[in-house]
Image (cartoon, helix red, strand yellow):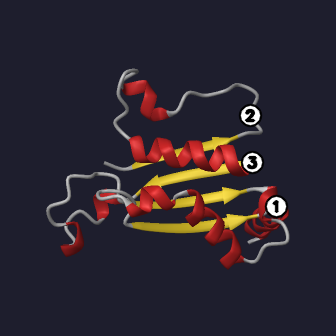
Amino acid sequence: MFRRAAVSLARAAPRRPLSTMATESQSQTPVEDTIRQKITAALQPTTFEIYNDSHLHAHHKAMEGSTSRETHFRLVITSSAFRSKMQPARHRLIYSLLKDEMAKEGGIHALQLRTMTPEEEEKRKQAEATA
């Protein structure tokens, strides 16, 4: 099951998270929902993409016996909160926001981060357009 959820705050119309569309009473992706809520509240990102790659790692020895389907995530975050911070400081900030989800049994096992300022994202987009 490949899930990709992207939030762009530049859009005019608000969107409901994909995970709440399936069932209103109980989310099928509580860890992903928590990641989205914490990152959005703390960093107010202009771009925020969550990739749940857990299904790609379910066969690994470390995942043997795990009942969680939410263990491996890739996050792409663009936020002005990253200005004047080097990559290690940005990553520490994310880890501190998600420390409870990383510490609990069946929580986040692996977290891949790509963090950018709005200026860095614009520069990346321009480079891709000319390539």
The residue closer to the viewer here, 54 or 41, is 41
10 Å neighbourhood of mark 2: few (<14), some, or many (≥20)? few
Q: Is residue 23 left or right of residue 92?
A: left
Residue at 79 percent of width and 58 percent of height: 81
Q: Which residue is mark 3?
A: 46
Q: Which residue is mark 1?
A: 122
Q: Earlier in the sequence, mark 3 or mark 1?
A: 3
Q: Is residue 2 left or right of residue 120?
A: left
User: What kind of element bears circle 1?
Assistant: helix
Q: As drawn, which residue projects farthest toward the left?
A: 65
Q: Which residue is mark 2?
A: 11
Q: Amino acid at mark 1?
A: Glu
User: What whole-number distance in Å separates the C-alpha atoms at marks 1 and 2?
Assistant: 17 Å
Residue at 45 percent of width and 46 percent of height: 32
User: What whole-number distance in Å separates the C-alpha atoms at marks 3 and 2?
Assistant: 10 Å
Q: Amino acid at mark 2?
A: Arg
User: What whole-number distance in Å separates the C-alpha atoms at marks 3 and 1?
Assistant: 12 Å
Q: How many marks?
A: 3
* Residue 125, quarter of the rendered image: bottom right
Q: Which is closer to the viewer, label 3 or label 1?
A: 3
The residue closer to the viewer here, 62 or 13, is 62
Q: Is residue 3 left or right of residue 36?
A: left
Give the percent coordinates (x, y) of residue 21.
43, 25
Give the percent coordinates (x, y) of residue 52.
41, 54
The residue closer to the viewer here, 130 or 71, is 71
